[in-house]
């Protein structure tokens, strides 16, 4: 069931999104060679709580940390640990915050120190595929337009698109209907949801530098590329409004950035 959010709910989600944004912004300064991924988790959790929210992921399906930190061939759901980040790593950080029972969810991939040209390229291209996807968001558009926008960037630039994990509706639950795939399929086209004012979606392209195939590690969470190739992941929480997309997980002045790309 897809829920349409009221103004009051959207306000809470706007606040949750801004807390997530502030954590990802701070992350930029925390991520450097020598830092442990657990330290990033600790700092993120403090900041979320300081701002009056709770980490959405902590305890979700038994998850034991507040954020996900996925390094190099890890795609998503990496568990923070004693692992030390090194110069040249490509690290994806996913953050969720619940404010007055409503969630915000976003992710970014960061370069640790200097990274290889292909690493820099996949980071930039995954980010721009999310930008292109957000530009599709308006009342009357269809989910497949989001999927097509992401997939076309991957095809032009030669990346694998992860299919086993997808974006999602979001609200008082972290994962709500509909699923938001990053590729077009007959299944999607046969049940192509029309976007309507009040829907809120977490759009989250995941690209790889090789095969799109992934597998889960024995820890029950960490998702890695089967061939060990680098991966990147960007995610934003986006509302469908009368004026087009509103990105909750950005600074207010950038919240409507997607509209210019229309
Ligand atoms: N942002 C992640 C997603 O939408 C949520 C991670 S779930 C967790 O898939 F349990 F790993 F935290
Ligand atoms: Co998500």
Image (cartoon, helix red, strand yellow):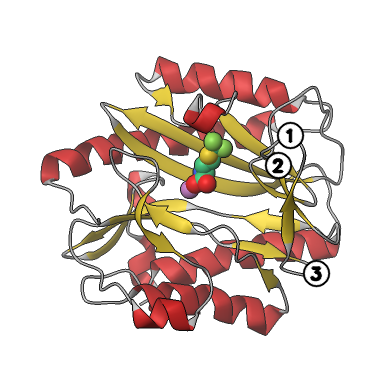
Residue position for label 2: 222
Residue 205 image offset from top left, x and y in percent: 56, 62
Up-down relation of residue 98 to residue 140 (above or below): above
x, y percent for residue 107: 55, 46
174 sits to left or right of 3:
right
Name the quadrant containing residue 89.
top right
Q: CA distance from mark 3 to mark 1?
A: 23 Å
Q: Give the residue displayed 47% in from the left and 72% down from the top.
A: 132
Q: Secondary structure at mark 3?
A: loop
Are the residues tagged 1 and 2 within 8 Å (C-beta)?
yes
Numbered badge on residue 219 = 1
Asked if residue 24 can be seen in this view, the reply is no
Image quarter of residue 53 = top left
Report the residue at 31% width, 28% height from top.
99
Left or right position of 209 against 221: right
Measured as percent of width and height from the top left, residue 67 is found at: 57, 32
| Image: 98 above or below 104 | above
Closer to viewer: mark 3 or mark 1: 1
Element under label 2? Answer: loop
The mark found on residue 210 in the picture is 3
User: Cα distance, mark 1 to mark 2?
Assistant: 7 Å
Indicate which disc, 3 or 2, sits on the residue closer to the N terminus.
3
């Amino acid at each position: 069931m897809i829920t349409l959010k009221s103004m009051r709910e959207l306000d809470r989600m706007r606040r949750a999104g801004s807390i997530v944004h502030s954590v990802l912004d701070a992350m930029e300064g925390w991520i450097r060679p020598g830092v442990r991924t657990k330290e990033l988790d600790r700092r993120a959790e403090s900041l979320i709580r300081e701002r009056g929210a709770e980490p959405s992921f902590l305890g979700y399906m038994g998850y034991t940390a507040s954020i996900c930190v996925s390094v190099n061939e890890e795609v998503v759901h990496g568990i923070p640990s004693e692992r030390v980040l090194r110069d040249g790593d490509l690290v994806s950080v996913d953050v969720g915050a619940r404010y007055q029972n409503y969630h915000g969810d976003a992710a970014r991939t960061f370069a640790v120190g200097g990274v290889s040209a292909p690493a820099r390229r996949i980071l930039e291209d995954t980010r721009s595929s999310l930008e292109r996807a957000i530009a599709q968001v308006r009342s009357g558009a269809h989910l497949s337009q989001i999927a097509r926008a992401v997939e076309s960037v991957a095809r032009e630039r030669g990346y694998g698109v992860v299919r086993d994990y997808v974006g999602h509706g979001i609200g008082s639950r972290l994962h709500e209907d509909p699923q938001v795939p990053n590729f077009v399929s007959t299944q999607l086209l046969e049940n192509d949801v029309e976007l309507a004012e009040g829907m809120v979606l977490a759009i989250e392209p995941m690209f790889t530098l090789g095969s799109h195939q992934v597998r889960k590690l024995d820890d029950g969470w960490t998702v890695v590329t089967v061939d060990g190739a680098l991966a990147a992941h960007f995610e934003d929480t986006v509302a469908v409004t009368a004026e087009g997309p509103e990105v909750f997980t950005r600074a207010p002045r950038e919240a409507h950035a997607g509209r210019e790309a229309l």
